[in-house]
Each structure stands twice: as structure tokens, then as C-alpha cells.
Image (tube, grey):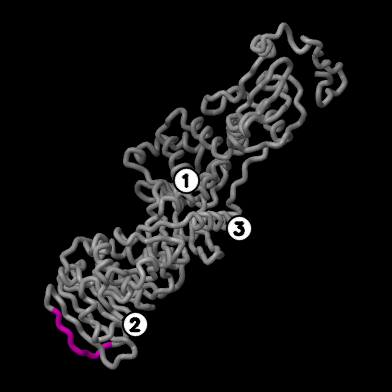
Amino acid sequence: MIRPLPEELRGLLARGEVVFSLKDAVRELLENALDAGAKRVRVELYGGGRERIVVEDDGQGIPLAELPLAVEPFATSKLLDPGRITTLGFRGQALYALRQAALLRIRSRPRFQVGGGLLLARGERVEVREVPAPPGTRVEVVGWEGEGSEREVAELLRRYLLHYPWLSLAFFAEGEARLLFPGAGLKEAARLAFGRVLTERLLPVEREGGGMRLQGLLSGPQASRTRPDLLFLAINGRPVAWPEGLLKTVRRAYRELLPEGHFPVGVLNLTLPLEAFRLRLDARKEEVAVLEGVEAFVEEGLREAFQRHNLARSLPEPRPLMPLSPPTPSGLPPLRYLGQFRGSYLLAEAGDTLYVVDQHAANERVLYEEFQRRLKEEGLKELPYPVLVELSPAEEVLLPERQEALASLFALEAFGPGRVRLLAAPSFLHPYPLLLPEIFREALRGEGKSLTELLARLACLPAVKAGHPLSRAEGQALLDALLQCQTPWVCPHGRPTLLALKEEDLIRRFGRRSGARAGGESRPRQPEEGLPEEPWPRGG
């Protein structure tokens, strides 16, 4: 039942949004249809929307007696409790705003009503009469002068289908079909929004518990953007902007899968208890805040989805190598693992020297030289799927003269003007498809250090992070692997991997006269030649 809102709510709601553009007008009418329980909606534009906008649905309709009230300001059937909003619309201003800007024609009939009603409204003039009508509502806006385009309306409709994939929707412009969707489900809605190729790379996400439900489709590591502009969210069917905390939660769940600053592509549909989120009544209707429990629920749902699809990247486990015998390739003596400091630094000894090793920098160096070796020994391997690279005119000119240099890193083919497809690359690049176009462009421009810088960046991604605890065996294995490197002193970025502290420095700093023998201590007895070294030195 449509009724005027009380005065105490009108002041709050008046500070919210009003209809400004063609997209806003279509959105308000579409949301009215969805709130009315429509299963089928038809949208039509004539003259780019300026001549006529039509939205027709098979929803519950408006009783004849309530038609005049439907176009009055702050009159709605939806808002009962401002703290428990269950509908998309709630302000009761959209039809009134359209009536002030254009001729509004509404034909409607509830299923229980014999015959329908037709309302004509413009400015202060309102006329109602009985007419034959099918069940549902048809709204026509004639002479709309707001800004907007057909393309924006199409994008809006595709966005809503991601959140209402069961909806049968038809969109016509100038009498020609632009979008026909039979309510075929989320995967088909995603094909409309993201395209067929990208949709095939989206992973299903689903979780339910504690009165909350999460459903959606998200990209894996092979597709992302530097902005979250293709990452959509709805809460209880309402398309909303991402709350800052929830967006950080998604980024945190992807932290080992995507490069820093990148966001996945896809859609998440959240169903929450009304007390778990808050809608801003005095702002645009897509601004919401959620409880921390919602963030934890979403993060766990994403992690479960990644685990189901084997996307949860584990930290690399350094493999023990064969026992080392000096000299090592670097000339460093064998290092014996003593312990780990603050989960980030390995403590080791060799002779009269104590070594402090940065575990992340050390693992970077190991991986970097491993990549160099594999590139030399394995060559190029076919990519799981071709990677398309868009070239600028200047880059396209360079392509013929750089073919031979590029062949050492990529197998490729032309793919139309200003485009190439990468077909093969070194196998260690396959897990990083997002970097491939950038790497190709660097090689195309002939930047001398591009390969070195590339390998350094790639080595950083999977290397053991600071704060990650290592067992004694893992720590020793990492030390052994570092000693096998040709240049173990620095990481690929030029930072030191280890620092050495001589025993004589310790003696001087502690103010002692001599080494371990001072004060009655005895030095560890060096193992006799041919006898195995004891695991720990005897004495103090």
C-alpha cells in the first residue's frame, strides 16, 4: 500500500540522490520493477532516451486508487522501518522527479484487479482513467532531457543481471534488440558483462553459514586489473559500492595470487541479515557499511574457493642439496644453521665468523639463478593459452627489426593491426600471464637490462617472506642452496643477502682479552681429518 512518509524521515531522505541522467532514470524504473517482484522486464529507448523511455514489467502492479499517490513526493509502499530496508527503492521520489522533468505515463494492473489504470502526469497536472491492461506495470517517460547514452544504459542492465541472473530482460533501442537475456543464470550473465573468454576463467565462489550466504564468480591469477572497476558487489540484491574494509579483505585473500595493486574481475552476491550491514539513507543508495564478521566470512569463502581450485600458492620449500664440500662456487665456506631471529633472519656459523642471512633476499637470489639456468637449458614452452598484446604505433614499427631478439624469449604471431599473440615463453613465466605483455614490450623496445630486471621481479614473488618461520632442515637447505649460487652476496635487486661478524669483533665489543678460552672456557675441538663433525661442540 502506497502511503506518504512521515515528516521526520523526509528531512533525512531529501539529502539523498535524485534522478539526474538517463541511466539514473532507467535504474529507478528497473528497481521499481524488481521491488514489485517482476520476473520479466522490457526496456526501450527512442531518440537516445530523449524522445521516450519505456520500462515494462510483469510485477504485482499498482491498484487504480493508488496511482495518483505513486507520483507524489515521499510516497512509497516500501519503507516501513528505516533500520530494516528490504527493497531497492525506499525514498518515494523517483516518479515524482520524472514527473517534474517530462511527461509521465503509467499503465498498471494488479492481477486481482479487473481492468487497469492509466496515469498521465506532468508538473502539477495529474490525470487518471481506467483502461484495459495486462498484469504488471508499463512506465513511459516522454520528452526526457537528461544526459546519457544507450551504452551507459546497456552497461547498467548488464550489471543488474549479474545480481539478478534469473531475470528475463529485453533491451531495445530505436526498435532494435540490443540485449536479450532469458534468465539463464549467473554464468550466462557474466558472459554478457565480461565476454566469453574472460568468463571461462572465472571461478565459482559459494559459502553459507551464520545466516549469511556468498555466491559469485571471480577470476584467478590469470586475469586482473589495476582498478576494481570490473569487480562488482551486491548486498541482498542491491548493487553497492565496495566498503573499504571489504575491498581490503578481497585484496588480502588474493595477496599471494595477484601482483601488488591488482584486483580480480568478477561479481560477489552477498545475502546478509539486516543487522549485519547499514545503508546510508542520506547519501547515494549504493553506500553501505558492513560488520567485521562479514569481512571474515567473505575472506574464508574466497580461501575455500582457491583451495578447491588449487590456487592457494604455498611458500616454496627449499630442497636439501647434496652435502657440500669446499670450495663452493662462490668461495664462501659451508654455513652451519644455528637458528632463526624474528622469523626473518637465519643465524649461521663458519669457522670464526657468525653470519646473519636475510631469508627473503637469499631465496630471491636462489630463484633468480634458477630462472637463468632454466631459460638456458629449457628454452621456450607453449603457453596454456595465447596472450594478446596491444602495440602502440611506435612499437608496431619496431616489430620487424626486433624479430630475432624477441625469438629468444617468445614465440608469437601477428593478430591484426597493432596486435600480436604470444604463443610460447620460458616455462617459469607461465604462472605470471599478467606480466607477459609488459615483458614483451620491454624486449621489443630493446632495453638492455629488461631480462635481468624481469627475472629479479619474478624471483621476488614466490620467495620466502620475512616473518615466515623455517624449520632447522628448511633453514639449512636454504643456506646450502645460497652457497651454490654464483653470486650469493646480494639479491637480484642489489641488497645484501648476508652479513658477517668475526669473532675478533665480538671479543672487542664485549671487552674480553681473548676468544672462547678466556675465563677457563675452551674452544671447540676441530674435528680430526677423516672423522665426522659432531653435531654440537663440547664444552662451553
Label 2 CA crowd tier, 10 Å (few <14, some 14–19, many 20+):
many
Distance of label 2 from label 1 (alpha carbons): 48 Å
Location of residue 88 (image quadrant): bottom left
> Where is mark 3, residue-wise?
308
**Residue 276 percent across, percent down from the top left:** 46, 61
Instruction: Say which residue appears at 86% left-offset and 16% top-offset.
Output: 528
Query: 371 left or right of 27?
Result: right
Residue 270, placed above or below residue 332 = below
> Where is mark 2, residue-wise?
60
In the rendered image, residue 132 lying in the magenta stretch gets the answer yes
Quadrant (top left/top right/bottom left/bottom right) for the C terminus: top right
In the rendered image, residue 38 lying in the magenta stretch gets the answer no
Q: Three-letter amino acid code at disc 1? A: Leu
Between disc 2 and disc 1, whose residue precedes? 2
Label 3 CA crowd tier, 10 Å (few <14, some 14–19, many 20+):
few
Query: 504 left or right of 401?
Result: right
Range shown magenta: 126-133
Instruction: Say which residue appears at 31% left-offset and 71% top-offset.
Output: 30
SS label for mark 2: loop
> Where is mark 1, residue-wise?
434
Q: Three-letter amino acid code at disc 2? A: Gln
Closer to the camera: disc 2 or disc 1?
2
